[in-house]
Every structure is written in structure tokens, then in C-alpha cells.
Image: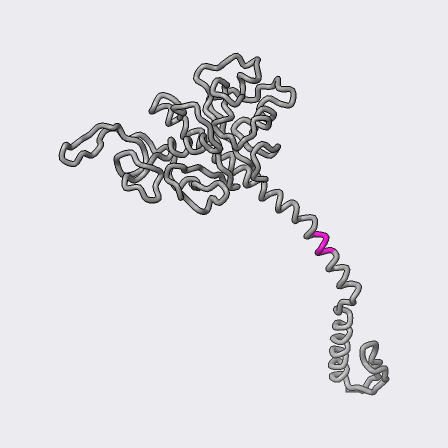
Amino acid sequence: MTPRQVQIERGCPALVLPVAEGWRRRIGRACNGANAAEKSAFTLIEMLVVIGIIVLLVGLTFPIVIGSRGKAEIAKVRMTMQMISTALEQYRHELGDYPRFMDSGAGDYRGAILLARALVGPGPKDGGNSLGQDGADGPGFRARRVGDPETGQAVGQVYGPYLKADALQISSNPANPDAGITDPTQPMLFDAIPSVVLYFPARRSKPDLTNIDAYVNSNNQALYNQQDNTILPLADMRRLLAGTSGNERKYTGPFLLWSAGPDGTFGTSDDITNFNE
């Protein structure tokens, strides 16, 4: 082949050489590769710009991710309350009424304990890490009628359980739900947050609800009695149920279910109940 003069351009020594056709192609490929490598390299400014964009995107998406997670937890809590409400209706259908107290006492989580014992049932008769004793093995309630005279075992209709023991987290420790049932006489149901689910049964005969004291108060004559779960302050219970004016009646159903919400504190604006859906 006739030698040609080839100008080796930017990226190669600036020389004019007599080169055969085959060598011209090889040198061209080498120079093109050098040019491509030079063009593909990032400068410091370009790298800083890319890093800045990544940081900006993370800053924009992080609150969205956190917010989505919070909404998912709230949705789970509402599903839990719906499950408990259905179980309470089944309890009433079989036993004729919703779970109620036999006295007019008070306690931080008195209603929450009543709810767990009523829906899940006592548990194994041999005690241990159970929910109590009812004279027969297993959760649920049985008629207190002696069967076989030799064994003395209780027989009769078995009622419940209305919630499976593994359907929700059950614990005796509100501050540490993961501790489990450390006291079989004080089980409580926990939602996804996790927060204790408080239970306030309404009075059978509704009082004159034009009076806020008859709607919600700290005595057993109110429609809802704050002393059933004194962990919820009376003032906050009134505010969230009846508004700041005290004239609203946001709910007059047969029972209240109440969660502390994402902040874990009862009586704040993010509380989740079966009336603020």
C-alpha cells in the first residue's frame, strides 16, 4: 500500500509520519481510545455536583418513606380495632352483653385487662404463663358444672376464645410489651405501635347526654367512665370526645377502644380510637 501521511491528533504525539494503511488504522484506534478515556473521566466539580444531587434526593425521599411507614402503622392499628370490635360483637352474641365490670373500682389499665381476659379467655388450669384459670385447659370460658364425679372436671358449653392468643401481642407490662405475660391476672392487648388498647364499656342505659358530666366523667354513672383506664387523663378524654367547647358528641357507641398512637402517650392529638376514623 502507498504510505500516507497521518496527523496523530489530540491525545497522541503531534507528528506527521509516513504510515501504511494498516498501521494508520491501528494508530487511529489507539488515539480514539485515548480520547474516549479522557472524555469519560469525571472532574472534581462534576463529582461534587453528582454527590449534591444524591444528597438532595435522599433528603426529599426520606420524609416520604418515614411518613409512609407511619401511615402503615396507623392502618394496622385501625385493623386491630376492627378485629377487636368484631370479637366484642361475637362475645355479646353468645353471652348477651359486652364485657363489663362487676364493681365500680378504678385502675390505670383496668379496662384493658378486662378486654384481654374477656376475648382471649383464661387459659391452662395449671397456671404458669397463662391468662388465668377457669377449671379446664385451654382458652375460652366453660360452664361451671362438675362432670364426672371421679375426676371432678368441669363440663358444659365452651364460649370463645373470641380472639386467638397469637392474633395480637399480649403482655402484662405496658412499658415493655416484649416481656410477655409476667402476671397471668393482668394480660393486656397491644397494637402494632405497640400501645395498650384501652377498653371503656358504655352504660347499658344512656344518661342525659346534654350534660358533659353524664357523657364522660370519672364515675360509673357516666356513659363512659374514665376510671376504667385512669392512664387516660379525664380532661384529655373529654376534649377528644366532646371537643374544646364540650358540646360535641363524637361517639355514643357501646364501647370505646383507645390507642396512644405513634407518640405513645395517651390523651394527645395523634391518639387512635374507634370513633376518629
Q: How many marks?
A: 0
Is residue 56 inside the magenta stretch?
yes
On the image, the x and y values in percent for residue 78 come to 51, 34
Q: Nearer the viewer, residue 263 or 276?
A: 263
User: In the displayed structure, would residue 62 be above or below residue 164?
Assistant: below
In the current view of this chain or complex, which residue is farthest to the front?
105
Is residue 132 found left or right of 223 in the rendered image? Answer: left
- The quadrant in which the C terminus is found is top right
Q: Nearer the viewer, residue 69 or 10?
A: 69
Is residue 163 found left or right of 242 in the rendered image? Answer: left
On the image, the x and y values in percent for residue 31 come to 77, 78
In the current view of this chain or complex, which residue is farthest to the left?
150
Is residue 234 inside the magenta stretch?
no
On the image, the x and y values in percent for residue 72 come to 55, 41
Q: Residue at x 32, y 38 (%)?
A: 123
Is residue 157 found left or right of 115 in the rendered image? Answer: left
Q: Residue at x 80, y 64 (%)?
A: 45
Q: Residue at x 22, y 28 (%)?
A: 145
On the image, the x and y values in percent for residue 246 come to 62, 19
Which residues fall within the magenta stretch? 53-57
Which secondary structure type mostly characterizes the magenta part of the structure? helix
- The quadrant in which the N terminus is found is bottom right
